[in-house]
Each structure stands twice: as structure tokens, then as C-alpha cells.
Amino acid sequence: MEQLVELEQKAILVGVNLNDQEDFAYSMEELANLADACEVEVVGTLSQNLPKVNPSHYIGTGKIQEVTALLEGNGGNLVIFNDELSPSQIRNLESELKCKVIDRTILILDIFARRAKTREAQLQVEVAQLKYMLPRLVGLRESLGRQGGGVGTKNRGVGETKLELDRRRIEEKITMLSKELEALVAHRQIQRKQRKKNDIPVVSLVGYTNAGKSTIMNAMLDTYNPSSQEKQVFEKDMLFATLETSVRSIPLQDNKSFLLTDTVGFVSKLPHHLVKAFRSTLEEVAEADLLIHVVDYANPEFERLIQITNETLKEIGVTDIPTIYAYNKSDLTEHHIPEVQGDKVYMAAKSRIGISELVEQIRRQIFKDYIRCTMLVPYDQGTVVSYLNEHANIIETSYEEEGTKLYMECRLSDYGKYKQFVIGGAGKQSE
């Protein structure tokens, strides 16, 4: 029955364009997409140009009548505002408009709550929701009395169906959930340290939500690790399909491999509660050796989306990691594919075009520290030969009187580890 209530929600979108922001029209379009992701039907839109937001009602009081008329004329029962509202703004607007009022933040939190699959993602969303709720208890209680069910209320109590939670109980719950989250985060940090110890390069997919990061990951798994069908990650043409960080190994032919991580997509005005809650997930990106910035090249606003992603990366402290731009969905444009232009790869992950070109660019970036050398390993050091056969690219093997002679390409760290067996000069790998 819950679903039926949600499908009947009809919303008016309201935004304030402060001092002619150039991205205002796009952020309103994005708000409509977010509403659609929550199965809310948008029946009207209203915007106002203002030098500053009205502190009591967000919009000018004269516009309240226009919103009321839009609600009545279109059978609307919900108003969604394009910015985060203060507790008093929610209360004032609801008492004037006589319907439920929610903001962009609660809309995004609601989508995250629906998409979260793992315990860690669920905890991160719960903590963000409770922190959002805390200063808004009064307004939310009135709002729930006005209309039960639907977007912005489902999971809003997060495990508590009634909102009769006082401040202390919410704070206690935040503390309790945060502790559980810390334990999961600590476990993931151990895994990260282990990966660093194993000296395997880490490549992170980043980008705007729904740019095709999971599709690229699955295309790479298909091409380079076909036996890992069960390791495919969830991909769907919708906002925030991925909330969990997935890590997969991509083995290449010459005994080289890298780890590919898929992370939560970005969106403009990503609520700070969420950025904070998902910081541990986003730290995966901060520790990567290389970023693949996935761009939906078919989106006419793609340059703006690149900018939003770069700003979000900056916000979480990611500034100086080498980056390759994967211009995905290029098959939906006039651009010839596959094509490589400097640090840009024009491709179409869904139809698997440009995957090998992208991997070649990754290879050039992350395997710079490989060195070509010849080692002569005594026969009683068989374990060293086994190790090198597994971890280096052996170009030629011959059996001499003194031991096994290996001409190979290996990591600088392995070269240092077995330097006593090196004979002749060593040089950097050729491109």
C-alpha cells in the first residue's frame, strides 16, 4: 500500500535564482530528475529571482499565493524546494501552503535510503538522516500529521516508525550508529593497507551520478576477467544506482594487474550531511593512484557536470591525483569512437567500444615504475623464480650452469628486493 501512496504524490518544484546563477536552470532540471527517482510526479515549477533568500519563507511572500494557485490548479499535494530549508522555513511554509514541504536535501537522502544495500551504506544514510532531522523535529512532526507516507517520510524515522523521538534519543542513536560505522570503516582501512602492502595499483572511477561508472567496471570485467561474472556490479540508468564502493581486480596479460574501485556518483549541492557520512567511502578515491573521471558526453551539460565532480573531489581533499577522462556514451554523439586525445578517451562502455583504449591509457599511467632487467637466480632459490613468474612479465627464460636466467620486466620494488640476482644493466620499460 505504501507504494500506492508514493505514486499519487504530485509536486510543485520551487527554486530561488540568487543573483542570476548560470547553473540555476540545470539545478532545477536536476531537482525534477531527483523527484522522478523518488516516483514523485512533477506537476508544476516556479522560480524567483532574488538577491538573497527570504529568511522566513525562502521565497518572497507574494510568491506563496502563486504556489498555492499551482497546487490547486494541478492537484498538487507536495512542494519541493531546491535548497536546504531551515526548520523555521519548513514550519512557516507548511502553515501557509497547507501541504507537505520538503527540500532538496531530504529528497537526496530519501534516494540514498532506497538504494543503500550494504550495512555500511545503510548506516551512513541513517546517520545523515538523523542529523538532518535533529533541528527540524517540530516541523517534521507537523508535516507527518498532515500527510503520512511518501517521499521524505519513508525511512525518515530510520528504524523508528514514529517521530516521537526526543532530541536525546536521536543523539544517542547517532552515537550508537556512528560507533558501528567506525568499526566497519576500520575494517575497510585494514583492507586498504593490505592492498598497499601488496603493491597493487588502485584506479578509482569517479564522476557525476549516472555517467556510466558501473557500466565501465562491468565492461572491463567482461573483457579482462570473464570468469568473474558473479562479480559484476549493479548498473542501471538511474540516479545513484551505486552507493557501495566495489573493488575488483583487473588482470592483464603480462602478469600485471590493478584494482578498480567504483564509488558513489556526485550531484550538485550534495548535502553536507551526506558528504560527511560518506567521507569514509569517498576516502577510497583519495588513496587511488589514478582517477578515471567518467563523463556522460551525450549530456549537453557535460562540462558543468565535470565542474561539479571536480568541486566535490576538491571538497573531500582530492586534488593532485593523475586523471584520465572517459568520455562515455560518445556513440550518442557525432564523435568518432574509439578515439584517444591526450588524457581523454572517447568511448561507449555499454557497447564495449573503447575499453581496450582506456585500459591502455591506464597501463601507461600506472606501470611507469616497471623496469627491464636480467636476473640469474641459483637453482636452490626456486621460490624466487616462482614469485617472479607470478608477479613479473618474463620475456625470456634460459637455464644456465649457475641457475635460471630471466629476462623480464618487473616492479621497481621487486627489482630492489632481488637486486643481488641482477646481471647486466637495467632500464625503464619501453612504451
Image (tube, helix red, strand yellow):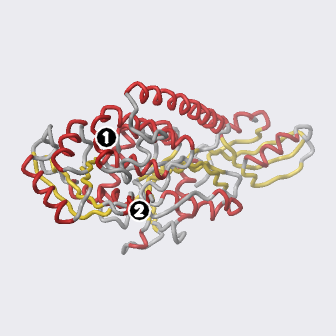
Give the Cα distance between marks 1 and 2: 22 Å
Which residue is at the far left? 62
Mark 2, secondary structure of its residue: helix
Mark 1: give few (<14), some (14-19) or many (20+) Cα within 10 Å.
many
Task: Evaluate whether residue 342 shows in this view.
Answer: no
- Residue 281: horizontal and vertical position, in percent? 50, 40
- Residue 116: horizontal and vertical position, in percent? 50, 48
- Give the left or right position of residue 128, taking residue 362 as reference: left
Residue at left offset 24%, top offset 41%: 85
Q: Quadrant of the N terminus?
A: bottom left
Q: State how many labels appear.
A: 2
Residue 143 appears in which quarter of the rendering? Answer: top left
Q: Quadrant of the C terminus?
A: bottom right
Q: In this view, does 220 lie above or below 409?
A: below
Q: Which amino acid does label 2 sit on?
A: Leu
- Give the left or right position of residue 94, taking residue 122 as reference: left
- Give the left or right position of residue 359, taking residue 308 as reference: right
- Residue 181: horizontal and vertical position, in percent? 54, 33
Residue at left offset 46%, top offset 52%: 114
Residue 192 appears in which quarter of the rendering? Answer: top right
Q: Which amino acid does label 1 sit on?
A: Leu
Mark 1, secondary structure of its residue: helix
Residue at left offset 41%, top offset 62%: 4
First in sequence: mark 1 vs mark 2: 2
Task: Evaluate whether residue 4 shows in this view.
Answer: yes
- Give the left or right position of residue 418, taking residue 72 as reference: right
Mark 2: give few (<14), some (14-19) or many (20+) Cα within 10 Å.
few
Q: Mark 2 points at which residue?
A: 4
Front residue of this view, candidates 302 and 184: 184
- Residue 219: horizontal and vertical position, in percent? 57, 63
Residue 140, label in figure: 1
